[in-house]
Amino acid sequence: MNQQSALAGSNTARWQGLDGAHHLHPFTNPKDLKQNAARIIESAQGIYLTDSDGNQYLDAMAGLWCVNMGYGREELIEAAHAQMQQLPYYNAFFKTSHPPVAELSALLAKVTPAHMNHTFFTSSGSEANDTVVRMTWRYWDILGKPEKRIIISRKNAYHGSTIAASSLGGMADMHQQGGIIPDIVHVEQPYWFGKRVELGTDLDAGEFGREVAQSIADKIEELGENRVAAFIAEPIQGAGGVIVPPDSYWTEVKKICAQYDILFVADEVICGFGRTGHWFGSDLYDLKPDLMPMAKGLSSGYLPIGGVMVSDKVADVLIDQGGEFNHGYTYSGHPVCAAVAVANIQLMQRENIVEIVHDSTAPYLQKRIRELGDHPLVGEVRGIGMLGAIELVEDKAGYKKFHKDRGVGVICRGHCFDNGLVMRAVGDTMIMSPPLIMQKSDIDTLLERAWKSLDLTLKDLA
Ligand SMILES: *Cc1c(COP(=O)(O)O)cnc(C)c1O
C-alpha cells in the first residue's frame, strides 16, 4: 500500500536537516526529534496524505481535527485565489468592514443555533477562548457585577495554548509549565472509562454522569454564585481523549446552568461544523450556550480562522449597554480566511455533508470501530459522529491499563503510520477524527489498517 517512487525522496534528508536545525515544533520533545527526524508531509488529496518519500497515509485525524471537507477542494482554493486578487487584506476596526466578513457573519447566524446571531472573529481557537474570557468579564462588568470573575472549567479539557486558553484548559502538563492565570478553577470530567480504571471495576454510567455534573453545582456553592462568571466545556472532550459523556451528564449540567446566574460556554472548536453528525455539538445535546468558540472546521483548516458565536442575550448587553469593547486582532475576520470559510460552509450545504454523516457514514463508522472491541488489546471503543476512541488495556475485565512507561499508545501509533494510517495516541487511548467526506469503503480501509496495527502492537508487547 505504501508505494515508494524511485524518484521521490531525494529532498527528504534536506528538509529534515533544515527542519531539525531551525524549527522549534509545537507539542514536541525537541531532543526526541533530534534522534528521529520529522516525517515530511508534502502533499494531500481527498483523505490521503503523501510524504516526501511518496508514502501515502489515510488521514484519520483530518489534519488536527480540521480538514473536514478533505484536501484539494477546488472551491476553497478558488475562493482564496479570487479574494487575494480582490482584497487580500483589510481590517474591521474603526467602523470598516468588507464583503467576505459580512457574508460569513450572516451565514454563521443561519447555521448556528437560532438564539445566536453575532460573531466576533479571531484567527484561532485559542484566540477565540481568550476572547471568551475577556467577553465574559466584560459582560458581567457592564451589568454591574464585576465580582463575577471565576470561570469553572474541567480537568483534562483542551481550550488552546495561549496563556488564557491553556489556563481554561485542564491539562496538568501544560499548567506545570508556567502556571495558570487567576480566577479559573477545574472540576471533574465525565470520563466514565477512566473512572472504571481508577476503581478497577464496573460502574453505573447514568449515576456517574449525574455525580460528575453535580460537582459543578457543588463548586458554584463553594465559591458563591456571586463570584462565578461562567462554566466552559467542550460538548465532547477532544484532545483529552474523545471523552463522550454518559447521557445523564449533559441533562444534569443543563439544569445546573439554568439554576444559577452564570454564562455557559460550549467550546465547539472540534465539535462544530458537522463533526458529531449535527452542525454543532450544542445541537446534538441541545445545550443553548451563551457563547460558542469555534475554529478548525470553520475553514476545513485551509486558512486560520476562528471566532466566538455570541447569543442574543449577551450580544444585547454588549451592543446596547457596553460602549466600546477594547479587544480585537489585526486579522479578526481576515478577508481571505473569511472568503474560504464562506466557501467551505457553502460546500458543506451543497453536498449535504452533515446529513450524510448523520444518516449514513457516522453510523457505519461507529458500528465498524466497535468491532475493534473484540481485539485482545482493546478495553473500550467509544465515539459519536465522526469521532472515535479506542482504549488499549492490559486486562479488559479488570479495567487495568498498561504501565505508562511502556508507551503502548506510541507503539500503536508507529504501527499505524507504518501501515498507512494516521491515528493519534493520547496516552494509551487511540483517537480518530476522520474527514467528514469519508465514504463507507474508506472506513473499511481504515478498519483494516487499524486492526493490523493493533495486531502488530500486541505482538510487540508479547
Ligand atoms: C484545538 C482546540 C482549541 C484551540 O484552537 P487553536 O486553533 O489550536 O488555537 C480550542 N478548543 C478546542 C476544543 C480545541 O480542540
Image (spheres, rainbow, N blue to C red):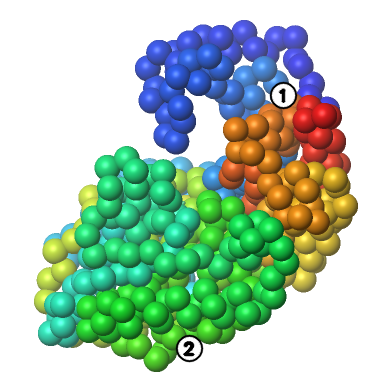
* Position of residue 81 measured from the top left corner of the image (x, y, whole percent): 46, 43
* Earlier sequence position, callout 2 versus callout 1: 1
Residue at image point 75% right, 44% down: 394
Q: Which label sits on residue 260?
A: none
209 above or below 298?
A: below
* Position of residue 311 measured from the top left corner of the image (x, y, whole percent): 37, 80
Residues at circles 2 and 1 in contact by the CB criterion of under 8 Å: no
Which is nearer the eye, 335 or 422?
422
Residue at image point 74% right, 30% down: 415
Q: Which label sits on residue 255?
A: 2
Asked if one can make out residue 83 in the rendered structure from this viewpoint, the answer is: no
The residue that mark 1 highlights is: 55
Does the closest atom of ligand 1 sit within 8 Å of the Cβ of label 2? no
Which is nearer the eye, 56 or 97?
56
Q: Quadrant of the N terminus?
A: top right
Q: Amino acid at mark 2?
A: Lys
Neighbourhood count class around disc 1 (C-alpha, 10 Å): few under 14, some 14–19, many 20 upward: many
Query: Distance from label 2 to label 1 (Cα)?
Result: 51 Å
Residue at image point 39% right, 22% down: 23
* Position of residue 68 measured from the top left corner of the image (x, y, whole percent): 61, 53
Q: Secondary structure at mark 1?
A: loop
